């Protein structure tokens, strides 16, 4: 696309008009058939050209609020409506959804259902064509170009990855060249790497093209990196709207509503509490700020590594158009981290790893392998297993290229790697859902090539990434009981009771599982898997699409699961889960095993992390930046570690080598 | 026995989906896909209706031959041809067997042959059109011929969500298989296994519908925000949508060629 098309008319807007892009005055709304109002006297004003995050607990009315902007409420959903909505100073009353939608683009949380055309270009043309705009093709191409999809214009939608689909939904909305963009929870359905891609595009739209961007989001680390204002909602009201640093430091409000502040902020707050220093007005919210903050506390003695990481932090903070905090995203960041780590004495690193206590003794869980027993027999054995798929254009697509692996009883294995590395495919091979195109897969001595899925699933439980895909009955109890009944297990009734109790589903047992919340659905899917007491359990992205409170809950549920199943494999992007749970980490990259070892070993290899595109937690990034080895997985750990270092430094005799702690 | 087993292994949902999608969208390089959809639809209308009023074996055979040629030009996948043959042979062969039972003899084969020819012409014409043009072109053609926009859109949208539906269907089926019990012995000619799978297909329908209903909520809302219903009432939008359709020399040649061929057939018949 030629560049002269790039600046859109909206960029001139902030100077011309003083009136807010969106103004909501005392709006209350009740959905038809409901008693409770979803919005209850909400007031909000969003300045043109701002980048605002809307946060709040589940069911606080975030999505409803955003549907006011394009008139879906009250025009499409006719409930009890009160109050006034203004767009650019003009009351939106009397304007139809179609008219308002030209000014407000909306990207849904389940964006895949928003795509209605077969090819990428068609999809981008769809809205301008409906409005009969003669330059629809140019608009579509411009929008695709903005989202970086121009090279894919002739592709079919079902050939795109999740991240590309989200960008396409965005391009579809942008083709009308609206002044305001509303994006509903981009992170919840995307892996961290793709989510960051989307945010980079949003940032460009906001900074360069002057669009007003509003996101509904609860991942505060993304908010800290990209948004300028944060608006907190509670029970249908807007509690406050503040600049991002101030907002994310309202720790009490966030805690009350179950929203986790960025790990950097948590660690800084905890460290301040540990050290008994007076509460600071503002803790750092981004990685760059936190590196400077902690670096300042530690001062000089950390040495070379510290200086360099601080320099990194600075560039990040200023040139914030670059990729943000998670190391996986841009090569820039991973490279920075690598530089910082390279500077540390390699022997120190090795010592630290071998001394690392967390590696073989993860938190809680009775099923730990005793080191002095004879090596347990392999439960899963892959030899040279390969997998190809056929695609629409009759091409063969290779997903796995000859994997050889032994997985022993009692292991808790995390499969990590970026999208398309072959994690899910490997799980499907083990479950017998896909047959290897080459080599063989043995599970408990059964060759998956000659064993049916029904037979294999007596021993191997497979839990889908999307729990909803597993639901085939009309109540939770029936879901859990289905397999036990069909296969005539003895005391099925008692087992169902145990499972319902273990996974805290007793109160939900008569409800339809499809209508439960994300976390509840996940618990049901785990109960279904565990009910047959399988020897092996395979979980595909169990923490995906979960909000943070639910995620915490899931970690508890995993511990519960260990009482029922001995060998568990999890494919995941969640490095905190990996660090806290797995006894073995297998890194997949382009269909091959790139590394196989303990979490500590894997996380100690910056080159590997960069190559495999792993998304580190913010605490891990901070540890790397501060030269702490092995890296801390969670903010509490980081704060405790820093506290010990600082305490030692203050004690006169041990000031010299804080890295060794 | 071995044959039946091979069959079972080949007949996977993935494969059916691939073949269907190839039939629908893989026609980009077929020579028929460059023709104007309006002309092709009218052409199809003729060959779908006319055979029912023709009795001459020669004319029917000639039409059938012509259809075979156009079907080859539309680059249809072998799978579709296979399904077609299965249908034709099954249907007509069955009638022939019944006619033998009720005192017919080999002479009853001739009228049945005629029926087969008629059915073949119609089926092959359908395959030519639906495989030679992608759903987008058909949808545009229908819209241009005055079919309501809501209908022509739902045709193209129907194809668009096919892969989504298949994915959903596959997952539901898989859930049943992962938690169900297959018959221990496949039975003679795998009938037990066949019955098991057929039963699953029926069971899977209900969960599939529920999942689809849940999805469509967003779709309907999103259509609204993207001006779909606005476009339905807007004649300018329709005109713009169809502005890329051109009636060119090759369309004229194709239609007049077909007409001439049919005229010659009738003249001889």
Image (cartoon, coloured by chain):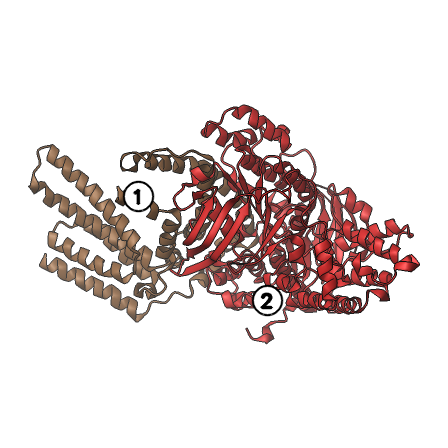
- Compare residues B106 and A574 and report the one nearer the observer: A574
Mark 2: few/some/many CA within 10 Å (<14, 14-19, 20+): many
Quarter where residue A38 is shown: top right
* Label placed on residue B5: 1
Q: In the rendered image, which quarter contains the C terminus of chain A?
A: bottom right
Please tell me which residue is depicted at 75% across the width and 62% down the height of the picture: A348
Q: Image check: A562 left or right of A131?
A: right
How many labels, in total? 2
Q: Colour of chain A?
A: red
- Considering the numbered disc 2 on the image, is that residue within a helix, a strand or a loop? helix
Vertical placement of residue B111 versus A314, above or below: above
Q: Provide the chain ID for the residue under circle 2.
A: A
Vertical placement of residue A507 versus A15, above or below: above
Residue B10 seen in render: yes
Q: Image check: A50 left or right of A133?
A: right
Residue A221 seen in render: no
- Considering the numbered disc 1 on the image, is that residue within a helix, a strand or a loop? helix
Residue B80, image x, y percentages: 29, 52
Vertical placement of residue A83 versus A352, above or below: above
Q: Mark 2 points at which residue?
A: A146
């Amino acid at each position: 696309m030629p560049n002269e098309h790039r600046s859109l008319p909206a960029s001139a807007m902030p100077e011309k008009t003083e009136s807010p892009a969106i103004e909501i005055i005392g709006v209350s709304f009740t959905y038809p058939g409901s008693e409770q109002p979803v919005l209850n006297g909400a007031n909000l004003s969003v300045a043109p050209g701002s980048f605002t995050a809307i946060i709040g607990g589940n069911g606080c009315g975030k999505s409803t609020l955003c549907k006011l902007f394009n008139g879906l409420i009250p025009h499409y959903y006719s409930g009890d409506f009160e109050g006034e909505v203004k767009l650019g100073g003009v009351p939106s009353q009397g304007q139809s959804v179609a008219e308002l939608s030209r000014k407000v683009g909306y990207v849904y949380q389940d964006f895949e259902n928003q795509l209605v055309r077969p090819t990428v270009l068609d999809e981008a043309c769809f809205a301008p064509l409906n409005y009969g705009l003669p330059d629809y093709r140019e608009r579509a191409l411009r929008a695709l170009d903005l989202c970086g999809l121009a090279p894919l214009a002739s592709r079919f939608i079902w050939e795109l990855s999740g991240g590309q689909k989200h960008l396409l939904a965005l391009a579809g909305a942008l083709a009308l060249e609206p002044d305001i963009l509303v994006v509903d929870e981009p992170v919840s359905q995307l892996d961290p790497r793709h989510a960051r891609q989307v945010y980079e595009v949003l940032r460009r739209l906001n900074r360069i093209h002057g669009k007003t961007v509003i996101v509904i989001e609860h991942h505060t680390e993304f908010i800290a990196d990209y948004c300028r204002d944060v608006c907190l909602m509670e029970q249908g009201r807007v509690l406050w709207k503040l600049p991002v640093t101030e907002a994310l430091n309202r720790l009490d409000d966030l805690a009350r509503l179950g929203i986790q502040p960025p790990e950097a902020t948590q660690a800084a707050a905890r460290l301040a509490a540990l050290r008994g220093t007076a509460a600071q007005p503002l803790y750092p919210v981004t990685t760059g700020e936190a590196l400077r903050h902690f670096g300042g506390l530690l001062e000089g003695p950390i040495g070379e590594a510290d200086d360099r990481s601080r320099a990194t932090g600075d560039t990040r903070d200023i040139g914030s158009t670059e990729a943000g905090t998670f190391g996986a995203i841009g090569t820039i960041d991973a490279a920075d981290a690598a530089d910082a780590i390279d500077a540390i004495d390699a022997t120190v690193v090795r010592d630290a790893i071998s001394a690392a206590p967390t590696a073989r003794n993860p938190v809680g869980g009775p099923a730990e392998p005793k080191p002095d027993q004879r090596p347990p027999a392999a439960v899963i054995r892959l030899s040279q297993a390969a997998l190809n798929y056929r695609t629409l254009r009759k091409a063969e697509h290779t997903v796995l290229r000859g994997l050889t692996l032994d997985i022993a009883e009692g292991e808790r294995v995390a499969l990590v790697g970026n999208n398309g590395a072959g994690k899910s495919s490997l799980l499907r091979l083990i479950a017998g859902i896909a047959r290897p195109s080459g080599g063989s897969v043995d599970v408990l001595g059964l060759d998956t090539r000659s064993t049916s899925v029904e037979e294999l699933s007596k021993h191997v439980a497979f839990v889908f990434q999307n729990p909803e895909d597993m639901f085939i009955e009309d109540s939770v109890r029936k879901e859990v009981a289905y397999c036990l009944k069909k296969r005539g297990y003895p005391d099925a009734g008692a087992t169902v009771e145990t499972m319902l109790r273990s996974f805290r589903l007793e109160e939900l047992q008569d409800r339809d599982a499809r209508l439960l919340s994300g976390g509840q659905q996940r618990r049901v899917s785990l109960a279904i898997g565990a009910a047959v007491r399988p020897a092996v359990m395979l979980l595909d992205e169990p923490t995906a699409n979960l909000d943070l409170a639910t995620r915490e809950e899931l970690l508890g549920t995993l511990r519960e699961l260990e009482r029922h199943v001995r060998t568990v494999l999890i494919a995941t992007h969640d490095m905190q889960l990996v660090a806290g749970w797995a006894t073995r980490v297998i890194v997949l990259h382009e269909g091959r095993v790139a590394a196989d070892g303990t979490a500590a070993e894997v996380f100690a290899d910056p080159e590997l992390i960069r190559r495999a595109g792993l998304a580190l937690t913010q605490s891990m990034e901070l540890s790397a930046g501060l030269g702490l080895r092995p890296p801390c997985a969670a903010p509490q750990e980081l704060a405790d570690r820093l506290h010990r270092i600082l305490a030692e430094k203050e004690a006169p005799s041990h000031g010299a080598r804080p890295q060794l702690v | 026995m071995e044959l039946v087993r091979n069959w079972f292994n080949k007949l996977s949902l993935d494969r059916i989906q691939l073949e269907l999608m190839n039939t629908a969208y893989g026609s980009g390089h077929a020579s028929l896909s460059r023709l104007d959809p309006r002309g092709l639809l009218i052409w199809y209308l003729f060959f779908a209706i006319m055979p029912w009023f023709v009795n001459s074996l020669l004319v029917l055979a000639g039409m059938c031959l012509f259809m075979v040629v156009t079907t080859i030009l539309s680059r249809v996948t072998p799978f579709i041809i296979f399904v077609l043959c299965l249908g034709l042979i099954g249907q007509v062969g069955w009638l022939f067997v019944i006619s033998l039972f009720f005192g017919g003899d080999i002479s009853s084969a001739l009228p049945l042959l005629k029926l087969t020819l008629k059915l073949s012409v119609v089926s092959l014409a359908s395959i030519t059109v639906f495989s030679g043009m992608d759903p987008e072109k058909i949808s545009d053609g229908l819209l241009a011929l005055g079919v309501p926009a809501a209908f022509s859109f739902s045709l193209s949208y129907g194809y668009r969500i096919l892969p989504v539906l298949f994915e959903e269907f596959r997952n539901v089926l898989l859930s049943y298989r992962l938690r169900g019990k297959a018959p221990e012995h496949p039975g003679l000619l795998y009938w037990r296994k066949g019955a098991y799978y057929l039963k699953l297909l029926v069971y899977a329908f209900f969960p599939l519908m529920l999942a689809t209903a849940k999805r469509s909520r967003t779709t309907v809302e999103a259509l609204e925000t993207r001006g779909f219903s606005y476009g339905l009432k807007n004649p300018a939008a329709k005109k713009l949508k169809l502005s890329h359709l051109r009636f060119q020399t090759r369309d004229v040649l194709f239609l007049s060629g077909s007409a001439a061929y049919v005229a010659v057939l009738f003249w001889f018949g």
